[in-house]
Image (cartoon, coloured by chain):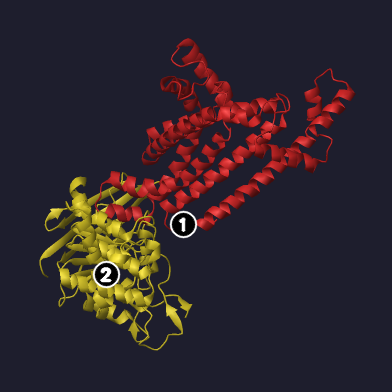
Amino acid sequence: MRRFVVRRLAAAVGVLFVISVLTFLIFQTIPNGDPALRIGGRLATAQEIAQIRHEWGFDRPIYVQYFRTMEKIFNGTVVSYTQGVNVLDQIRHGLPATLSLAVGAGFIWLMLGILFGVITAIKAGRFADRALTVLAFIGVSSPPFFLGALVIYYLGYKAGVVPLGGYVPLGQDPAQWFSHLIAPWLVLSVLFIGIYSRVLRSTLLDTLGEDYVRTARAKGISERRVLARHVLRNSLIPIISLWGLDFAQIIGGGAILTESVFSLHGVGQFAAESIGRLDLPPILVVTMLTAFAVVLLSAVVDILYAVLDPRIRLSG
Amino acid sequence: MSERLLEVESLQVSFVTDEGTVQAVDEVSFALGSGEVLAIVGESGCGKSVTAMTLMGLTRLPNARCSGSAKLRGEELLTAPERRMREIRGGEIAMIFQDPMSALNPVQRVGDQIVEQIRAHEEIAKGPALARAIAAMDRVGIPRAAERARAFPHEFSGGMRQRVMIAMALSSSPSLLIADEPTTALDVTIQAQILHEIGRLRAETNAGVILVTHDLGVVADIADRIVVMYAGRIVEQGSLDELFYDPQHPYTWGLLGSIARVDRERPPRLPTIAGQPPSLVSPPRGCHFRPRCPHEFARCTEVPPLESRLAEAPEHRDRCWLSPQEKRAKRVVDGQIGLAGGTTVVA
């Protein structure tokens, strides 16, 4: 276990290094990426630009720029090029909304994905299976900005059952927190419910053909118990790893569209706005946050795997 | 025969598939007494496993058609309600499967898997059930059973896993044990141990045993009576001695001829039966073995009834039109029982 933790931490450092270097380099080659021009604005003279370049250190060699930026990220003083605000403060400010979105949506899509997966597998080929299959494909092909707009227009603007957007912290008013999040949760979940139910359906059908399921039936236990204890439990193992990675991505601001449509002001929306301004420091920090969340969650998934399947041993 | 435990009469099982109706089991009848070992022998796909699964009520699928009768101590199994079948499955009839590598759930401790079976049939707390599971494991020769009950299937060898399966089957004291190819996936040395174990438990518990196998060599040690199946039908049935020393059906000759024996001179080539078993969707008219049989004649296009053709052995039945005299003459190949004209593979 200790070796596992050490190895994963080493891997996390490696991943963060590679990701940050790549992101940094992309911004050196991107057209219109020169931050001095953006900071200076449209009316700046060449002299003013040169001065900005010097003040911000853009005239130093690229590796110096990289290490100075990293240094600022890790001591918490990194500042956005175009807004002049502290990036980590912004992230800290957006993280509760993003975490609330991820936890709620992650729970909903996991539960409904399992439910629909089980129904389609045990009713394979029959009406319920076909109907849910069509729904799954509609869900997978509905982009959140479209679905979100529909929900806001019909349920928010016309019917008035959900707010038109925004985020209320949980500590401030739990009821308002919930009512502001229910629509984003559902919209974000739709895509994942479609994917998860399809993946689970095929895993379940494979497991149903296993010899040990026949053994379980031969024991004389009820079909419900056969399904729950022997079929579902063993089929959930691949779903867990899928869930870990998707969840990590959303914590790292991956739900850009959903967060923006519902104005949650989370990490994802912050990332979207920063990309619009081609603002390197926030994008760098968000990318590293995502990478870190993915590495962390996949370590958690691997631990869960070893608990769920005794044949698997932890080895970095 | 001792007390009638199981009576199967004219059992028919077919499955509707996209290719047509598969007649998996056709007019199968046999009986079994307590403490008796009946072997059902035949090639893959001859219907022996489907017969066994049907007795367990495990072939009740939407596309399956079942008729005839199968009675356990007089109680009809084919039409019993699912609730009653669940009590019978794993309670009165227990089953051991072919591949112990895949027949146990890989993510559950073996002790828990046995406990699950015990608790499916009795109101018993987990603690005492586990104690019984450990006792059952101990009884089938698993060393340090209390400790091993906490292990997972992948931590056992193939032979030990099959012992776990036997312990599981015996944990609820069944009156009928169905062993479907219990030794096929095991090493030869382990095969003998497992058969010995099944034989010993039969003697201890007086359970009836149905041993499903494709290997006549396996049954010689343990079976009292043998049913030989081919393409869904019984082609010959009788006692062990009758079948081994006076086999009546050419298919049985072929099976006997293809046992590799170490007590005889090594043949230059291993004998086999030419051809493949027929498709069960469109089997040949008349005797199903006809296309592979070197002794075929005109009458073989009619289905031969399963009946005794020997005055001295009324219980020894077969499905072959040849007269007993012709059979005794034709079944001798190179001085031993075998099927003439079979292709051979290099030994």
Residue in front for this viewpoint, A233 or A180: A180
Give the residue displayed 47% in from the left and 31% down from the top: A105
Image position, residue B315 (x, y; %): 16, 71
Q: Mark 2 points at which residue?
A: B321
**What chain does mark 1 sit on?**
A
**Residue topped by disc 1:** A312
**A191 or B155, nearer to the observer:** B155
* Residue B177 coordinates in the image, percent (x, y): 22, 63
Question: Residue A236, position in %: x, y?
Answer: 42, 45
Residue B119 at x, y = what percent?
Answer: 21, 53
Q: Is mark 1 on a helix, strand or loop?
A: loop
The residue at 38%/45% (across/down) is: A232
- Rendered residue at 36%/58% (across/down): B283
Is residue B103 toward the left or the right of residue B310 in the image?
right
Q: What element carries label 2?
A: loop
Q: Which chain is yellow?
A: B
Q: Can you say which quadrant of the picture contains the C terminus of chain A?
A: bottom right
The chain whose colour is red is A
Q: Residue at x 55, y 19 (%)?
A: A149
Amino acid, disc 1:
Ile
Residue B264 in sight: yes
Q: In which quarter of the image is residue B262?
A: bottom left
Which of B159/B229 is in front? B159
